[in-house]
Amino acid sequence: MPTMQHHFSLKNYNSFGIDVSAALYATPETIEELKGVLDQYDFTNLPYLVMGEGSNLLFKGDFEGLVLNPRMKGIELVEDESGQVVVRVGAAENWDSWVEYATRQGWFGLENLSLIPGSVGSAPVQNIGAYGVEMKDHFAWLEAWDLQQKLPVRLNGEDCRFDYRSSIFKTNARGRYIITHVAFRLNKQPQLQLNYGPVKEAFTKSRGATPMDLRNSIIKIRNQKLPDPGEFGNAGSFFKNPLVDRTIFKCIRVDYPEIPNFHDKENCVKIPAAWLIETAGWKGKRTGKVGTWPTQPLVIVNYGGVTGQEILDFSEQIRHDVDKKFGVYLEREVNVV
Ligand SMILES: Cc1cc2nc3c(=O)[nH]c(=O)nc-3n(C[C@H](O)[C@H](O)[C@H](O)COP(=O)(O)OP(=O)(O)OC[C@H]3O[C@@H](n4cnc5c(N)ncnc54)[C@H](O)[C@@H]3O)c2cc1C
């Protein structure tokens, strides 16, 4: 049975590097251990948080409850058909190590999602995505502990209602499930996704041909563009790209004909949040020890010793200015705790 640790420092367990602690911290490695932890804790009255590697969390302060870090490991081939495989992966496996392993095994499809920080168990929560691919494109099912029914359950893609950086785990079932395993359906034949302009360019330039070459191109692009959380605390994109009504979009375009946009759902247009933030004057802006990253204003950076509340206040100023200038409300991608 895993012991619960008291006043556990989370400073090295969140990618913003915020110096906070959890009143209780537990790391169950099996379902039995998880049940044991749950039996010891009063979930009706006390707060709890499920946590992976802390790369999409912003702590405003100490967490006065239980932080659960599921430590189920393992990679298991469960189906091997003519053209595809289904592989079941433990929640605690590191996402990028899993992507590298899959690519080496000749199980293809996740290459564009290379180098995204975090654990496998967190990937379904916001349906991680990058460079034209989303986790849902290769999702088979997941296994979770349902805190409501007090039972282990298996959920398929439809149950999870994946959307752009969203799922039931971020919306109406927030806090209900503890994901323990995720299964992926992958191709045995490479199907390289090169639709995203800069990826195609980097891949062609590198004279790439294989999925591993594609993975390497993605890693190169990401390393050039994004700050390393080990050096500058951050949680990747702070906000989502907003989906705006076409009529509102047309009004903005009158003043900003150069506004980049992507066609999305019927009558809606997706605008890059980075462009809105930059145009509102926030690119590379710094207030004390918090600022936006000079080459990617969507990323808010801890330049050293900043508190979660300071980061939140800074982000609210950006949100306010973008709203004032464009009438567009930015939704946070990062989970504030
Ligand atoms: C430099 C950088 C770049 C990034 N780039 C991208 C990107 O390109 N695309 C992208 O989509 N994201 C990106 N992210 C965000 C982040 O990597 C992902 O959201 C990732 O899935 C978070 O994993 P984690 O294990 O760190 O989750 P955590 O931060 O620990 O948790 C995130 C959320 O998931 C919940 N959760 C975690 N584990 C479980 C579980 N087992 N069961 C139920 N709920 C759980 C938590 O309660 C929390 O709400 C980036 C982050 C950084 C720091």
Image: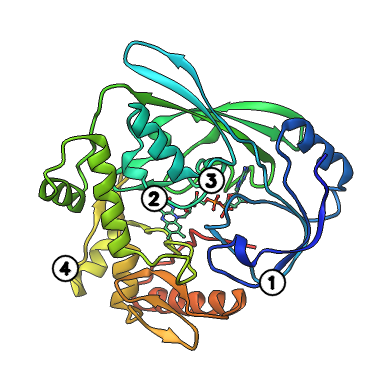
Q: CA distance from mark 4 to mark 1?
A: 41 Å
Which residue is disc 3 drawn over? 119
Badge 1 density bin: few <14, some 14–19, many ≥20, Cα 10 Å: some
Q: CA distance from mark 4 to mark 3?
A: 38 Å
Of the image marks 1 and 3, the number of the one nearer the N terminus: 1
Task: Say whether marks 1 and 2 touch (CB < 8 Å).
Answer: no
Task: Say whether marks 3 and 2 touch (CB < 8 Å).
Answer: no
Quarter of the view holding residue 46? bottom right
Of the image marks 1 and 2, the number of the one nearer the N terminus: 1
Which residue is disc 2 drawn over? 115
Q: CA distance from mark 1 to mark 3?
A: 23 Å
Q: What amino acid does circle 3 point to? A: Ser
Badge 3 density bin: few <14, some 14–19, many ≥20, Cα 10 Å: many
Q: Position of residue 4 (x, y in %)?
A: 82, 51
Q: CA distance from mark 2 to mark 4?
A: 31 Å
Q: What amino acid does circle 2 point to? A: Leu
Q: What amino acid does circle 1 point to? A: Gly
Which residue is disc 1 drawn over? 61
Camera-side mark, 4 or 1:
1
For ligand 1, tell me if the residue under mark 3 lies within 8 Å: yes
Which residue is disc 4 drawn over? 258
